[in-house]
Image: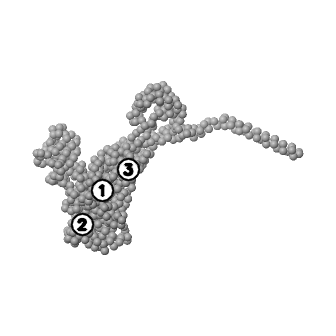
Amino acid sequence: MDPKDQILARMYVVLTLLGLVPVAVAAQMGRVLVTETEALRDRVRDQARSTMTIPAMRGDILDRDGRGLAINTARYDLALDPTVEGFQAQADPFFDKLASLTGVPASRYRRQVKTRHSTEYVKLREELTPRQYEQIESWGTPGVILTPKFGRRYNYGTTAAHVVGHVGGDGNGLAGLELAYDDTLRGTPGRRIVRRDRSGRIEAYVGGRVVPPERGDDLVLTIDLVRQAALETELRRGVRESGADWGTAVAMNPNTGAILAMANVPTYNPNRPAAAPDAARRNRAITDRFEPGSTFKLVGAVAATEQGIIGLGDSVETGNGWAVFHGHTMKDVQAHGTIPFADVIAKSSNVGMAKTVDRLDAGTFYQYARNMGFSQPTWIDLPGEVGGVLKRTPQWSATTQTSMAIGYEVSATPLQLLTAYSALANGGRIMRPYVVAERRDGTGSTLERSEPETIRRAFEEETADTLRSAFERVVDRGTGTNAQVEGLRVAGKTGTALQVTNGTYSAEESRASFVGFLPADDAKIALLVVLGGPNSGYHGGDVAAPVFRRVARRWAGTFPEVVDRMTDDAPPVSGEVPADPRSSAQALPAERTEAMPDLTGLSTRRAVAWLQDHGIQPRLRGHGTVFRQQPEPGAPLPNHVSLAATQ
């Protein structure tokens, strides 16, 4: 075969093979259409299906009496599958009722259905209210699809904002308890299967099992809304009157660690968290360290007393109000001369405390500070807590021990300081503070209850009993007289710490504080107030102690056990006793009576005692002498009685 014939033969073979390719493709297509049609359709359906999340309702955050601090707001999206059997028969009345319910013309809804991109799905309306949801559900229209969406509302705005915290746009906790207990509160989302088009839009709800969402658990707090509001009001007043840059206050039950209230100024509204600066959203009670100043003298007093270095009646020479320690001069506000150690505490003598603590072994003093919780977190159930700063003894300079004796070269958070003073109140035990009292499910059943937890014994009960009288003397006739509460025994300590500005301590950047507890001999309330940068006076006894007093006076009536301990002969402070007050010996019905007696003119202690003896819950505002009651005398005995009293 000549070359030309060879080339032609090869061309014919190639063309023949190329011609067979379409035949092979067509044959394969035919085979697929005949044998694999259903399998391919199933694969297409699977690829078009996706899971749609059904949001879970977030648990509520409640105060100790069940008031809703953080609750949910529900909204619903309305969609429709017009192909569902039975819808067309009810379409016209459905659109008419929907138009009447939403204020949107029925023609618009009909047009949405007519121009829908999917034959089996169309969204008609968003953001329906719960009332609208219930009405649409009651119609029982086939093909109607209602999908919930939940928002978060903080009923009392700024009240307890730093404790409760807030959520983000996705509903996840970002601060406070909302963050710390996010897993508990948010519940478990549900899911359902949908079919989407190539653009990701829902075409239809596919039949199959719908997994319903599980609601989150509720949190019941140790905080009472009324007390919290009172604390915030008085703290704002204190910041305003002192010209301070900021303030923080925290109260706890010293026997259990339960937080009674926690407040900061400035604050923010968790309904609009982005509108507030970062500083306003900071919970200074647990995130800010400061040199505690004279309030830290508790540590030196405990260590020196328990180690037998000194007794409350032992004399301390404070001289002319100044002394030199290791080349550093320390001064008192005024000269005290020779005074007993109890007055070193009461008069807040820096010289006297430094001389006393300088006699202690450095390691012993350091260990007492650590045992009382300084340098460590308190482990409160709130996010963002920091530990304090307490240098180890190898890092101490020659002046560290005497500086620490008066609250310098050491830093603590307000809550750490309050926890230490709570130990003085309860007999030497460091308690773990907590805010959440209970965790409940959606039916209100208690799932978990917080119990008081003792972290350690910091010092002996005998030491606490001994020192308590000295800290009570601070309020009776020392630097804390502005914290006196009429009719109640109060123990506490003032603190003033200057802050470093340009390398030196300056009164322009002081931290004024007062921490105390009441009643002094059986404390139910421990409260700390700190004001940052006050300009009307920088001593804690001048600006922080009055805040303590006002809060304690407002709170006293909310603690029946405190009211019972108030003396009947407390001197008047404000207001006038109503005319013609009756003697406290006024007779009250001893036996069970069906009519409400006249309690006006009686002491609050006696009136509350009578009510409690007869199974009636008193609601008391003020203290001293009752001048108004509700219900009036002669009315049938109620379950609750409101009393108003004045000094």
For the rendered model, the colour scheme is: one colour
* Residue type at the position of mark 1: Ala
At x 86% / y 43%, what residue is drawn?
Answer: 5
Give x and y (percent) for residue 311: 22, 68
Kindly identify which numbered label has been placed on residue 515.
Answer: none
Q: Is mark 1 on a helix, strand or loop?
A: loop
Q: Is residue 54 left or right of residue 377?
A: right
State yes or no: discs 2 and 3 in contact (Cβ < 8 Å): no
Task: Assign the N terminus to one quadrant of the image.
Answer: top right
Who comes first in sequence, dot 2 or dot 3? 3
For marks 2 and 1, the one nearer the N-term is 1
> Secondary structure under badge 2?
loop
418 vs 604: above or below: below
Q: In this view, does 491 lie to the left or right of 176?
A: left
x, y (%) of residue 417? 31, 60
Of the residues shown, which amino acid type is indicated by label 3? Ala
Residue labelled with disc 2: 333
Q: Quadrant of residue 342?
A: bottom left
User: Could you tell me residue 489's position as x and y percent?
Assistant: 20, 57
Task: Name the residue at 50% across, 31% down.
Answer: 112
Q: Element at badge 3?
A: loop
**Of 611 and 81, the residue lying toward us:** 81
- Tell me the amino acid under the disc marked 2: Val
Left or right side of 26 for 390: left
Position of residue 628 relative to residue 240, above or below, is: above
Nearer to the camera, 105 or 207: 105
Q: Which corner quadrant of the image does residue 73 belong to? A: top left
**Residue named by callout 3:** 276
Does residue 605 appear in the picture of this structure?
Answer: no
| N-terminal-most mark, 3 or 1 | 1
Residues tagged 2 and 1 counted as in contact (Cβ below 8 A): no
**Rounded to the nearest whole Å, what is the CA distance between mark 3 and mark 1?**
19 Å
